[in-house]
């Protein structure tokens, strides 16, 4: 019953799946934890547009540590320039635009990851006007007015070596960060401090670890070794997955 | 045998001349470009790395007396030579050294805005090195066109210390514009080189690749290309309707000024006096403010650290950190001026830095002001509405409208 058509179909499927074979890709995961007493959240005082911005309490978000000591908003990305990219992961991450919302006079989320060529939409759900001043190092800076209910699209053509800042000149306490990379391999830690980067090619790879307050996370120890002075960590990615475990960061690292 | 004798004699003579040149006969030493020490220190470059950047820049751009421009810059070397060097006359009696005659005392020989008079001016002179210019006819992040810079030199910048150079012959203005572009490209290339160290892989051993690909294709060309692209990046402005009802337009402009969409009121204030958001900095000053903060907290942290339980490795790191903090403090003292906030423009004065033509105001509103907090209205406010705002703003100095109407006269001393 094995018709030549069937056989060639099987052959074609084998060929197609060659590029995305499951055992060639692995997942990197881990969890950043704060070592020491978790700092108390610092409340900010809104002195502009108080009727809207003062409605809900605002807190400084440069260092957010959860009750479980997890450090939120740590940025992890693959440094290697010519890294092999898993087409499925690329497609999934690039599927829709990334959004930052101006909501309650803060940016939500605080840190986003966008790929080169992918659209970043900065929208405004507030009833007051904002502006979003994006200051990258390699890409052109932009600063658009974003009226109540409006939005402004931004795309980046080059990779950024470090996250780019986003601020609002009308409400100076507002701050967000954009990680711009040329591949889908970046993550921002969740409220519990955990992260996961999927579909990374198996083998040796170098990660960059960064946090808004601490800068490059120098010298942190993981299950896969210690990061260097520039916050770079060499990791071996296994098809079965690579767990960096609990990554403790000393309180002193954030005293910048 | 004779050549053997001549060579040492020559060497002696050259050495003698060098000594004479260095000691001089009452002559000042040749001018040099100051390295961007703020960036070098921020990036924690080693002495060797600083030296490598200086060597590369010397090869790519030459010296203030002897500028070099690679064909990729698109610059006209003949124009540069007219502007470069000490003030002098050439063999046909033509004035040379124009930049040092007219610009260097404020903008500095390097274009770093650290000339001897810079500290006394408010606002400070422009630092060309980041390649950011405010008053132009192109989109926010784009470079100014050649004509923009010529116009700026012709008109000066009203409300600042930048005078008009309208009395200079056109050929001299051309030379100066070319030289400003040259200094800006050099400064931007220097910044790119200094920042590139961070991105190096370990096997580069802290040294930038001295290849044509890296230095020219990846570093210089993108900078030069932005200057070249400016000519085609002019904002297309639909003309203001000739039959516009000015009274209605001003009323519409007022509505937009106070409205949530254009939101001008947030910074320029309900009075239009520029008394809204007043504690912001421009990009040049903000960079120094941020470094100052990092330095202050870094010093506190270093002082708090106890050296008692440190391993030899940690101790040497601690010392390196203290040395870096100490160096940074000194660099800021010498290479940065005290940061100042940027007040939003007082629109009741009728003084517009980037020019007073309606189209100049249109450009400012459409594109925002690069390097300053002023955002772009482009995409949010349609062109006809921008024209209404322009008309309203142009009416403000005459007290025709707003909180300070003609019926509420204002004392001159309160206008500041």
Image (cartoon, grey):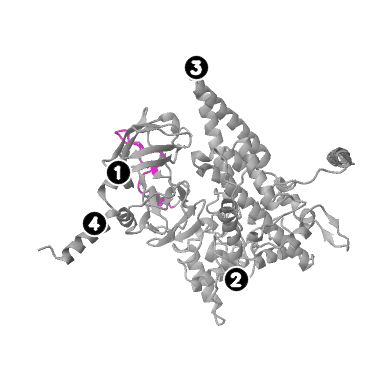
Q: Which mark is residue A27?
A: 1
Name which quarter of the figure residue B165 lies in: bottom right
Q: Mark 2 = which residue?
A: B359
Tag nearer the camera, 2 or 1: 1
Say yes or no: labels 2 and 4 on the same chain.
Answer: no
Give the residue number, with chain letter if any, for mark 4: A14
Camera-nearest label, 3 or 4: 4
Residue identified by numbered label 3: B308
What range is drawn magenta here? A49-76
Say whether residue B113 is left or right of residue A227: right
**Mark 3 to mark 2: distance in Å?**
66 Å
Q: CA distance from mark 3 to mark 4?
A: 64 Å
For the residues tagged 3 and 1, is the chain the same? no
Label 2 CA crowd tier, 10 Å (few <14, some 14–19, many 20+) = some
Name the residue rendered at 36%, 44% in the picture.
Answer: A57
Residue A47 x/y as whole percent: 46, 47
The answer to whether the residue labelled 3 contacts the one labelled 1, judged by CB atoms less than 8 Å apart, is no
The residues tagged by marks 2 and 1 sit, at their Cα atoms, a distance apart of: 55 Å
Q: Secondary structure at mark 3?
A: loop
Q: Position of residue A165 (x, y in %)?
A: 47, 49
Q: Is residue B63 visible?
A: yes
* Secondary structure of the residue carrying numbered label 1: strand
């Amino acid at each position: 019953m094995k018709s030549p058509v069937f056989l060639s179909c099987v052959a074609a499927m084998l060929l197609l799946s060659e590029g995305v074979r499951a055992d060639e890709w692995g997942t990197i995961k881990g969890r950043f934890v704060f070592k020491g007493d978790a700092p108390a959240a610092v409340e900010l005082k809104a002195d502009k547009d108080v009727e809207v911005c003062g409605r809900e309490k605002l807190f400084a978000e440069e260092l957010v540590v959860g009750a479980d000591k997890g450090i939120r908003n740590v940025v992890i990305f693959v440094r290697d320039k010519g890294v092999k990219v898993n087409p499925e992961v690329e497609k999934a991450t690039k599927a829709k635009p990334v959004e930052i919302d101006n909501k309650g006079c803060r940016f939500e989320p605080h840190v986003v990851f966008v790929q080169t060529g992918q659209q970043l939409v900065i929208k405004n759900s507030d009833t007051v006007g904002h502006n979003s001043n994006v200051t990258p190092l390699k890409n052109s800076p932009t600063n658009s007015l974003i009226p109540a209910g409006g939005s402004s699209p931004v795309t980046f053509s080059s990779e950024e070596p470090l996250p780019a800042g986003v601020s609002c000149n009308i409400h100076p306490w507002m701050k967000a960060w954009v990680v711009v990379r040329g591949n889908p391999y970046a993550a921002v830690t969740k409220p519990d401090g955990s992260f996961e980067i999927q579909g990374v090619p198996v083998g040796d790879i170098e990660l960059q670890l960064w946090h808004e307050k601490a800068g490059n996370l120098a010298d942190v120890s993981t299950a896969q070794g210690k990061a260097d002075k520039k916050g770079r960590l060499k990791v071996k990615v296994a098809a079965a997955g690579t767990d960096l475990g609990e990554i403790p960061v000393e309180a002193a690292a954030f005293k910048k | 045998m004779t050549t053997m004798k001549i060579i040492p004699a020559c060497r002696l003579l050259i050495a003698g001349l060098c000594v004479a040149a260095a000691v001089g006969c009452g002559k000042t030493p040749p001018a040099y470009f100051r390295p961007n020490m703020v960036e070098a220190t921020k990036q924690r470059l080693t002495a060797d790395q600083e030296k490598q950047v200086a060597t590369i820049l010397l090869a790519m751009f030459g010296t203030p007396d002897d500028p070099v421009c690679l064909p990729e810059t698109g610059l006209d070397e003949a124009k540069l030579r007219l502007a470069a060097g000490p003030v002098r006359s050439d063999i046909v009696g033509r004035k040379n050294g124009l930049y040092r005659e007219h610009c260097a005392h404020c903008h500095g020989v390097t274009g770093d805005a650290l000339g001897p008079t810079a500290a006394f001016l408010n606002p400070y002179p422009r630092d060309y090195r980041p390649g950011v210019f405010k008053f132009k006819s192109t989109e926010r992040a784009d470079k100014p066109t050649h004509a923009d810079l010529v116009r700026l030199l012709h008109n000066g910048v009203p409300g600042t210390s930048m005078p008009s150079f309208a009395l200079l012959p056109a050929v001299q203005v051309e030379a100066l514009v070319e030289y400003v572009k040259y200094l800006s490209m050099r400064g931007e290339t220097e910044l790119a080189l200094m920042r590139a160290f961070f991105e190096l892989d370990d096997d580069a051993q802290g040294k930038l690749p001295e290849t044509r690909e890296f230095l020219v294709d990846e570093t210089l060309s993108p900078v030069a290309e932005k200057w070249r692209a400016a000519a085609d990046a002019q904002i297309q402005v639909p003309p203001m309707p000739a039959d516009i009802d000015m009274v209605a337009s001003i009323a519409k402009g007022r509505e937009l000024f106070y409205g949530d969409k254009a939101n001008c009121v947030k910074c320029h204030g309900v009075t239009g006096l520029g008394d809204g958001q007043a504690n912001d900095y421009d990009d040049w000053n903000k960079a120094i403010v941020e470094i100052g903060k990092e330095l202050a907290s870094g010093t506190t942290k270093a002082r708090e650290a106890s050296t008692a339980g440190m391993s030899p490795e940690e101790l040497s790191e601690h010392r390196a950190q203290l040395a870096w903090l100490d160096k940074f403090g000194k660099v800021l003292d010498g290479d940065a001026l005290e940061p100042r906030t940027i007040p939003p423009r007082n629109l009741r004065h009728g003084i517009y830095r980037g020019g007073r033509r309606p189209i100049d105001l249109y450009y400012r509103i459409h594109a925002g002001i690069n390097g300053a907090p002023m955002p772009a209205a482009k995409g949010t406010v349609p062109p006809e509405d921008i024209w209404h705002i322009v008309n309203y703003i142009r009416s403000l100095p005459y007290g025709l409208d707003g909180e300070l109407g003609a019926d509420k006269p204002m004392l001159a001393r309160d206008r500041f």
